[in-house]
């Protein structure tokens, strides 16, 4: 057990943050004020009395803490000396100076405290401020500095609680198998159906409690540890370990798209893609390469307290609702007292959403895309273009009554901080005018196309027929291309690419300007751990976080475990690519690693702080298509390893943070992730082979059970467009959309502008809440999504994160994330039942409420300009090649 922890009765590990103190400043008794050579020393501890209530209330307001948090902190604060506080606050200020989640009022107080030389020379004159800062120090180190984390994550740990048990493994692997099988089977269906990890988390609880009640306490002892079928009450650690297994297993391998487009005769028709060895090697490679990167990034994305990971909090809230017995009444609006427990509140809200979701999802589907303004004049082009939800830009004050719409892109307004939601809306609002300008100005001939489509068109305004630009082997044919057409994008899609370019540069610039110190110290920590040196400055910084200190009770996963995983994944990838006629260099794997090394830390930090994930798919297509122009299959591998490596590393880091919050031993987490991913990969590849060989007419319009493969079709189009035709013809010299490359310097400029404002006006609260990457990210929501998916989250996020959190903190802490989990689970379960019982067999309700949203221009998009017979837009034949 770590030196900074002690075990108390009941197996609860109670935090004693002694390492936060410098040894020379630890006092065993109250010291007197002394003066040596005119320098005053004021290192005495103190205790609170009634006269200190002003400091007590000030700290409560600054950090938005509850009464219970304050009571815990007061005892710890009484043990701190002035030197302790200065040491703690120096580190806190360095970490959270630019943290938009951290209260600015506390940062200003810390700055004033550290810069006040008179305070340290004559502390007796500033006793009130000294006592307040001691309390603030105790609040920050005894628990998380973020109210949203304190709301669901305990700052205590029961080291004796069972975790890696027989029943947790059986339940976890059963759900991993079920989710992998189901999601792979229906991944190619239109519409697809996916069972998410929250369904497994919800169902695992009654199964676990059933095992607790009915299984006998029999087992065996291995290496001195007894493993029983029933080790006692079903614990929250077992429950979370099951959830983590399900979380890594429900995703299907991204390389399945490559296999589909290789194997099927209507695509590249390469029979070798049906070889099981080839399929499993490339699937294992892409699935496991992210683990190696996630392990290396722990110091950057898991250990720091500022890496909150908002999505994890909803998962933990559901876990806590099932496993927390205490139920304290909290104050609500209008003088009410809320006494309902979290578990009962969850069941109540789950049931309400389960019933309600039947309306927007089946009974009255127009409630989902509530484009009521377009009902006035369905054929009015301009009205539908501006306000339409299906084919328009979605400018609508009341655009939906479907909570599922708000969950798009993992942007739950109850989960994601308000500043993140609002900044993204700012980006949407700004880019809204850019889209309008492009379309109404017919820039890039976008007026001939639907304004907000993600499809690719030819110069006749028809969908781009890639077969007219390639030869029989699927390679680019310049003569056929010159006789056909360049590819054209809609206005929304053009803006998406421009802002995507800006997102990438803004992400890197933001990381350098705002987090360079943390990144440097993180790399120093990795270097020192490899050299097996003692604790580093970075380790001391992480010791400020109570959860990191508690996790020291468990053995960490060595770096070499993750390195072995990374090496084996690379070997699998090289074997798969080099062992078959892929016409691709194994170097694409190292390209993917290089791209991940550059982006994973900035992308992970932004995801952990804002809930927004920057994906590298467009950049991977852009670079890969430029390097291997004319080879679609090679571009697909560039895209897969470039995009998936970073995406998986971020996803696995999120799971590591889940385990970190719930205090699951790191080695248990590692083994559970590896085994669940390994099993799910084999399950998915087995189902894939069944689909390829046993389903007649699969991925065609004649396929049974609607297995028409819409995602595969899109992947094939993208592979030919960016791999065969190549981005050089689109964004290269004299390319159609070369000017949109201005997005790259634009991303840098926006970050420097915001950074400069904060430096020039450090006391402006509103500039601190501006997040440049989130703003740039708002510009990529278009095509086919629009403002109707973003705007509804803003007032809800404000009500939750600003109004309720500031006025009724205890109420918000108790129910906010539970409500988010309940509604998400209600939607998931209702969606599965509706799909299999009704929609699977084509049983749809036909009435006005389900048809009115799809009339006129909302059914078939209305372009700005039209073509006459034989006419086409864009460059003339012979002017492009």
Image (cartoon, helix red, strand yellow):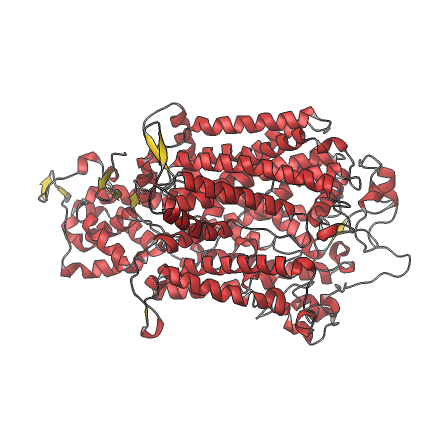
Question: Left of 663 or right of it: where is 128?
Answer: left
Residue 306 shows in this picture: no
Q: Residue at x 27, y 43 (%)?
A: 88
User: Count of labels shown?
Assistant: 0
Quarter of the rendering containing residue 592: top right
Compared to residue 367, the image places residue 31 above or below, namely above
Residue 369 versus residue 626: which sits nearer the camera?
369
User: Looking at this view, is 714 or 670 the one in front?
Assistant: 670
Q: Which residue sits furthest bottom? A: 376
Q: Nearer the viewer, residue 38 or 765?
A: 765
* Residue occupying the point 71% across, 67% down: 854
Image position of 716 (left or right of 400):
right
- Residue 507 is situated, as x and y percent measured from the top left of the image, at 53, 44
- Residue 150: x %, y % from top left: 34, 53
Quadrant (top left, top right, bottom left, bottom right) of the C terminus: top right
Q: Residue at x 69, y 62 (%)?
A: 391
Image quarter in which the N terminus is found: top left
Report if residue 701 is visible in the image. Answer: yes
């Amino acid at each position: 057990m770590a030196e900074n922890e002690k075990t108390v009765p009941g197996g609860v590990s109670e935090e004693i943050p002694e390492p936060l103190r410098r040894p020379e400043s630890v006092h065993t008794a109250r010291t007197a004020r002394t003066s040596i050579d005119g320098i005053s020393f004021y290192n005495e501890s103190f205790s609170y009395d009634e006269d200190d209530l002003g400091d007590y209330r000030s700290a409560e307001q600054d950090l938005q803490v509850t009464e219970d948090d304050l009571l815990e902190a007061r005892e710890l604060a009484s043990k701190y000396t002035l030197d302790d506080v200065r040491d703690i606050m120096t580190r806190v200020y360095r970490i959270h100076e630019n943290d938009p989640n951290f209260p600015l009022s506390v940062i200003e107080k810390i700055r004033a405290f550290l810069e006040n030389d008179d305070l340290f020379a004559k502390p007796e004159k500033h006793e009130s401020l000294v006592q307040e800062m001691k309390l603030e120090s105790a609040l920050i180190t005894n628990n998380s500095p973020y109210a949203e984390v304190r709301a669901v994550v305990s700052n205590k740990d029961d080291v004796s609680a069972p975790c890696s048990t027989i029943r947790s493994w059986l339940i976890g692997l059963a759900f991993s198998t079920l989710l992998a099988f189901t999601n792979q089977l229906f991944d190619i269906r239109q519409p697809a159906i996916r069972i998410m990890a929250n369904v497994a988390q919800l169902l695992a609880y009654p199964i676990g409690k059933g095992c607790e009640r009915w299984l006998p306490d029999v087992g065996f002892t291995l290496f001195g540890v007894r493993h029983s079928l029933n080790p006692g009450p079903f614990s929250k650690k077992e429950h979370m370990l099951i959830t983590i297994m399900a979380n890594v297993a429900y995703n299907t391998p991204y390389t399945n798209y490559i296999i589909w487009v290789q194997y099927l005769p209507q695509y590249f028709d390469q029979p070798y893609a049906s070889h099981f060895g080839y399929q499993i090697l490339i699937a294992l490679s892409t699935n496991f390469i992210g683990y190696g990167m996630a392990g290396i990034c722990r110091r950057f994305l898991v250990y720091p307290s500022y890496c909150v990971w908002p999505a994890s909090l909803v998962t933990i809230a559901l876990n806590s609702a099932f496993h927390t017995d205490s139920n304290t009444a909290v104050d609500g609006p209008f003088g009410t007292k809320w006494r309902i427990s979290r578990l009962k509140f969850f069941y109540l809200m789950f049931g309400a959403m389960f019933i309600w979701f039947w309306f927007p999802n089946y009974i009255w589907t127009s409630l989902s895309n509530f484009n009521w303004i377009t009902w006035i004049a369905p054929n009015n082009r301009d009205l539908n273009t501006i306000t339409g939800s299906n084919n328009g830009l979605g400018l609508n004050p009341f655009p939906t009554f479907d909570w599922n719409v708000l969950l798009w892109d993992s942007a739950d307004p109850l989960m994601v901080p308000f500043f993140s939601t609002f900044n993204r809306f700012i980006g949407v609002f700004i880019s809204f005018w850019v889209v309008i300008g492009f379309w109404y100005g017919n820039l890039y001939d976008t007026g001939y196309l639907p304004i907000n489509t993600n499809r690719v068109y030819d110069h006749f305004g028809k969908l781009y027929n890639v077969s007219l630009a390639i030869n029989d082997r699927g390679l680019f044919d310049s003569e056929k291309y010159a006789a056909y057409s360049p590819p054209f994008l809609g206005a929304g899609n053009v803006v998406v690419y421009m802002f995507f370019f800006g997102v990438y540069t803004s992400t890197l610039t933001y990381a350098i300007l705002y987090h360079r110190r943390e990144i440097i110290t993180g790399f120093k920590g990795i270097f020192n751990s490899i050299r097996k040196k003692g604790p580093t400055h970075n380790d001391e910084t992480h010791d400020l976080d109570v959860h990191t200190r508690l996790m020291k009770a468990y053995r960490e996963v060595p770096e070499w475990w993750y390195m072995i995983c990374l090496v084996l994944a690379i070997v699998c990838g090289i074997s798969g690519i080099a062992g078959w006629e892929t016409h691709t260099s194994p170097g694409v794997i190292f390209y993917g690693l290089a791209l991940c090394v550059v982006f994973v830390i900035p992308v992970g930090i932004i995801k952990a702080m804002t809930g927004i994930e920057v994906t590298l798919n467009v950049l991977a297509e852009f670079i890969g298509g430029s390097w291997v122009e004319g080879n679609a299959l090679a571009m697909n591998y560039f895209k897969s390893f470039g995009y998936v490596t970073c995406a998986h590393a971020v996803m696995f880091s999120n799971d590591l943070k889940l385990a970190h919050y719930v205090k699951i031993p790191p080695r248990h987490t590692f083994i559970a992730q590896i085994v669940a991913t390994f099993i799910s990969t084999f399950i998915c590849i087995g189902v894939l082979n069944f689909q390829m060989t046993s389903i007649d007419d699969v991925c065609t319009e004649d396929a049974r059970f609607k297995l028409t493969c819409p995602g595969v079709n899109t992947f094939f189009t993208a592979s030919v467009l960016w791999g065969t035709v190549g981005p050089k013809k689109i964004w290269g010299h004299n390319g159609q959309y070369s000017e949109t490359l201005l997005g790259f310097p634009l991303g840098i400029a926006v970050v420097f502008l915001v950074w400069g404002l904060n430096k020039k006006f450090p006391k402006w609260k509103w500039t601190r809440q501006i997040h440049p990457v989130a703003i740039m990210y708002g510009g990529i929501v278009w095509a086919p999504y629009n403002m109707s998916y973003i705007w509804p989250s803003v007032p809800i996020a404000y009500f939750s994160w600003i109004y309720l959190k500031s006025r009724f903190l205890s109420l918000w802490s108790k129910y906010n994330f539970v409500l988010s989990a309940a509604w998400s689970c209600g939607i998931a379960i209702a969606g599965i039942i509706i799909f299999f019982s009704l929609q699977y067999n084509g049983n749809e309700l036909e009435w006005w409420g389900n048809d009115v949203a799809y009339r006129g221009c909302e059914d078939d998009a209305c372009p700005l300009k039209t073509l006459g017979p034989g006419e086409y837009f864009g460059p003339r034949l012979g002017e492009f090649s």
